[in-house]
Image (tube, helix red, strand yellow):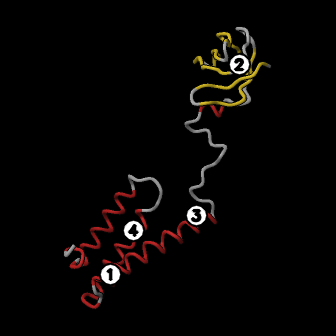
Amino acid sequence: MEFLMQMEYWHWLVLGLVLLILEMFAPGAILLWFGVAGLIVGILQLVFGELISPQIQWLIFSVLSVASIILWKSYAKKHKIDVRDENDTLNQRGKALIGKEFILSKAIINGVGKAKVGDTHWRVLGPDTAVQARVKVVGFEGASLKVEPV
């Protein structure tokens, strides 16, 4: 605890850089703003030296961190940055198949069957349907496609 009250300018600069490096490995943009605040406090302490007490340093760091996060969130929301597109099908292959039609390679019995999609057989869920029947994908559940007869 005593160390926190005796931080030199270079401690703040190192803290800021470490937080910026950690930001590269963490999702979102939270550590970025703590890192920037740490760098600013380090620069202020370098310029003004002993004029800034440790309590004021931590206060500046806290205020800058919180204010920059709030400003960033507001800016990102206004400019629609970091907002996921609901039509994005990356890593959701089942979602990309909605609306497409396929032939059942295995009859749907008790609500479960298989359909050939490209070079893969997908597990399908739907009403009991005979093999070789044409079905349309209406949704997905995990790695299974929800289908209905066409």
In the rendered image, residue 82, in percent from the top left (x then y), is placed at: 56, 56
Kind of residue at badge 3: Ala
Kind of residue at badge 2: Phe
Q: Is residue 146 above or below residue 2?
A: above
Upstream in sequence: badge 2 or badge 1: 1
Kind of residue at badge 1: Gln
Upstream in sequence: badge 4 or badge 3: 4
Residue depicted at x 19% and y 76%: 2
Few, some or many residues within 10 Å of mark 4 (<14, 14–19, 20+): many
Which residue lies under the disc numbered 4?
34
Q: CA distance from mark 2 to mark 4?
A: 51 Å
Say whether residue 27 is left or right of residue 143.
Answer: left
Kind of residue at badge 4: Phe
Residue 57: numbered disc: 1
Q: Are marks 1 and 3 in contact (CB under 8 Å)?
A: no
Q: Is residue 40 above or below residue 69?
A: below
Q: Is residue 97 above or below residue 21?
A: above
- Where does the N terminus fall, quadrant-wise? bottom left
Which residue lies under the disc numbered 2?
102
Which residue lies under the disc numbered 3?
76
Residue depicted at x 37% and y 80%: 59
Q: CA distance from mark 2 to mark 1?
A: 64 Å
Q: CA distance from mark 2 to mark 3?
A: 41 Å
Q: Is residue 73 above or below residue 120?
A: below
